[in-house]
Amino acid sequence: MYSCLLATSEAVPPSWMVLPFACLLFLIAAAPLAIPHFWERYYAHTAVGLGAITAAYYLIGLQEIAPLMHSLKEYFSFLALVGSLYVVSGGILIRVKGEATPAVNCLFLLTGAILANVFGTTGASMLLIRPWIRMNKYRVTGFHIVFFIFVVSNVGGALTPIGDPPLFLGFLKGVPFWWVLQNCWQAWLLTTILLVGVFYILDRRNFLRAPERVREMETREEHWEFAGLVNLFLLAALLGAIMLPFGWREGVMLAAAVTSWFTTPARIHEANEFDFAPVKEVAWLFAGIFLTMVPALQVLGANTAALGLSSSLQFYWSTGALSGVLDNAPTYLAFLAAAFGGVGLNLDTDMAAFLQQQSQLLKSVSLGAVFFGAMTYIGNGPNLMVKKIADQQKVHTPSFMAYVLRFSGPVLLPIFALVGILFFSRWRVF
């Protein structure tokens, strides 16, 4: 889906050109709390304005358009995928009667983690977030949304190239389709079980604090109803389109979205409370992100070889740290290039030898890119989409900083550290 910004030969911009990107990240984190009314009205202007600063520097200062064109191409692919999945999944109604117990919620998250490898983290997130909110509607809280993002929108998709964009890039570079499943399933299983286990403890406490009438409802048998299932065929077409070349891929995705929009009965859209507000906000914010991160990625790509990375543990943490704030797909490419020895990524024919000699490095880069995408709302495409849908459904979700300080920091970092020790350190047991 993504072209490689990091393999181009354009001049590397100075480090201070990362400032627009850093400024945008700061505003996404702080502005909704510090200046909420201003941000709600002018977030699009701010994101595009900062992106325009970067674009002007490349066009006027460096007189280079290629990096911007690469980024705009990636943005178009990103928006076509996210937007079409949002529209198609919005035409599928999963109605739940009754309330979910903590055990049922855990089973739902585990199912979502598996489906993320079939439909992709974006597809699974868009398909399941609305029923997730419905089945917990009488006691849904911010942590329900956060753990959905952790498990379904990120960690769950670590087993196939369809699951998450970084792994698809690896597949395009010659990594065998089933390599990730064969080599990463143990880390996936451990991380998923630990996350679902922590969620069970929190959800059990939430359940016990709920009014007695709610707990009685949750012990009744649940009833599930499905409508708009013809959109599953359109969803399959979207997933198949991922393998097509640029242009054809986006054309099929947009055609599927248009078909879904005009063939889905209005009653299903009304029941899903469907509108375009969430995808609109994501589109504007990521327009700024994709433009301002161009110099950040080029500076990263030019310096990965100089970082002195040698062990798989170092690659795991380095890839993960930047995947939480940069788009995790090009970050994966940057550190894959570093694992190859700092050379370019046009090495498809050398991938077999690389896998035989340095499989641990690829494993660490793959898991670091996928897992750490859950560290912030902007670490992976579906994160912010899930938050916006939850906000639209009147669920109180944590702010950007609260998400990091209350949830991803205390919950994810210890689990990811354990994964690093067990799988990539000198004391590794797997």
Image: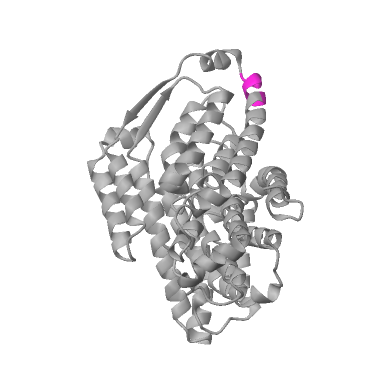
> In front here: 220 or 119?
119
Task: Inspect this view and state whether residue 262 appears.
Answer: yes
Q: Position of residue 188 (x, y in %)?
A: 58, 45
Residue 74, relative to residue 118: is it above or below?
below
What residue sits 65% from the left and 19% below the top?
208
Seen in the image, is 245 located left or right of residue 205? left
> In front here: 167 or 297?
167
How is the protein colored in the picture? one colour
Task: Inspect this view and state whether residue 27 appears.
Answer: no
Residue 9, relative to residue 297: is it above or below?
below
Magenta span covers which residues? Answer: 205-210
Q: Main secondary structure of the magenta part?
A: helix
> In front here: 183 or 152?
183
Seen in the image, is 240 located left or right of residue 181? left
Q: Position of residue 184 (x, y in %)?
A: 57, 49
**Quarter location, residue 320:** bottom right
The image shows a total of numbered marks equal to 0
**Quarter location, residue 79:** bottom left
Residue 161, relative to residue 226: is it above or below?
below
Quick check: is 200 in the magenta stretch? no
